[in-house]
Image (cartoon, rainbow, N blue to C red):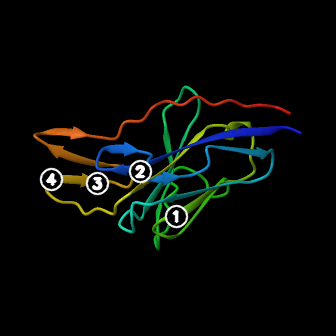
């Protein structure tokens, strides 16, 4: 039997500050080839933090956004296929993300991030994947650390 080891890391996102204190998800998930792997993510930031982002980072590569979603909105998978990934988010404080038909290419670090729903103002511009807050002409964005992963066979 061959299994894929998938690591997860949690973040919450607030105008350029990343942290993991209030967001929780499993740190490691094993999945058999061909099966689905579902990750649940929850937070204690309150109902204003109703936007959820799921990222993936393969070893030695940049993090990439797989899906952006929120309670009561249609998930935006961008370039990724819904035949490979799915997400459920019916309440502000939690959501789930599924990798379907797991294979070697799915071994990576997956990140759950949450943010407040924001409105564009003259001092702040936001997109689906990040917010940039301008202070004294400088843009501030969240910083992320690279986390290693591995694949094990059994």
Where disc 1 sits, the SS reads strand
Q: Is residue 11 above or below residue 76?
A: above
| Mark with earlier residue (1, 3) | 1
| Mark with earlier residue (3, 2) | 2
Instruction: Indicate the position of residue 47 as horizontal and vertical percent values.
Output: 39, 69
Where disc 4 sits, the SS reads loop
Calculate the distance from the C-alpha at mark 2 to the C-alpha at mark 1. 12 Å
Calculate the distance from the C-alpha at mark 1 to the C-alpha at mark 3. 22 Å
Residue placed most toward the observer, 129 or 13: 13
Residue at x-position 35% and y-position 66%: 48
* Mark 4 Cα shell of 10 Å, populated few (<14), some (14-19), many (≥20): few
Tell me, for residue 126, which label it has, or none. 3
Judged left or right of residue 127, residue 68 is right
The answer to whether mark 3 and mark 2 are in CB contact below 8 A is no
Quarter containing the N terminus = top right
Q: How many marks?
A: 4
Instruction: Indicate the position of residue 124 as horizontal and vertical percent values.
Output: 20, 53
Instruction: Indicate the position of residue 33 as horizontal and vertical percent values.
Output: 81, 44
Quarter containing the C terminus = top right
Tell me, for residue 123, which label it has, or none. 4
* Mark 1 Cα shell of 10 Å, populated few (<14), some (14-19), many (≥20): many
Where disc 3 sits, the SS reads strand
Q: Nearer the viewer, mark 1 or mark 3?
A: 1
What residue is pinned by disc 1?
94
Instruction: Indicate the position of residue 83 as horizontal and vertical percent values.
Output: 67, 57
* Mark 3 Cα shell of 10 Å, populated few (<14), some (14-19), many (≥20): some
Calculate the distance from the C-alpha at mark 2 to the C-alpha at mark 4. 22 Å
Tell me, for residue 12, which label it has, or none. 2
Calculate the distance from the C-alpha at mark 3 to the C-alpha at mark 2. 16 Å
Q: Is residue 154 above or below residue 9?
A: above
Judged left or right of residue 145, residue 48 is left
């Amino acid at each position: 039997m061959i299994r894929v080891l998938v690591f997860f890391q949690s973040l919450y996102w607030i105008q350029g500050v990343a942290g993991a204190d209030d967001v929780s998800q499993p740190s490691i998930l094993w999945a058999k080839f061909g099966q689905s792997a579902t990750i649940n993510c929850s937070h204690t930031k309150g109902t204003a933090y109703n936007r959820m982002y799921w990222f993936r980072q393969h070893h030695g590569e940049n993090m990439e956004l797989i899906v952006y979603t929120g309670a009561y909105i249609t998930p935006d998978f961008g370039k990724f296929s819904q035949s490979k990934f799915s997400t459920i988010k019916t309440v502000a404080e939690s959501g789930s993300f599924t990798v379907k038909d797991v294979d070697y290419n799915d071994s990576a670090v997956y990140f759950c991030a949450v943010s407040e729903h924001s409105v564009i103002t003259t001092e702040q511009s936001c997109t689906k994947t990040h917010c940039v807050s301008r202070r004294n002409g400088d843009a501030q964005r969240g910083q992320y650390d690279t986390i290693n992963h591995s694949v094990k066979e059994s």
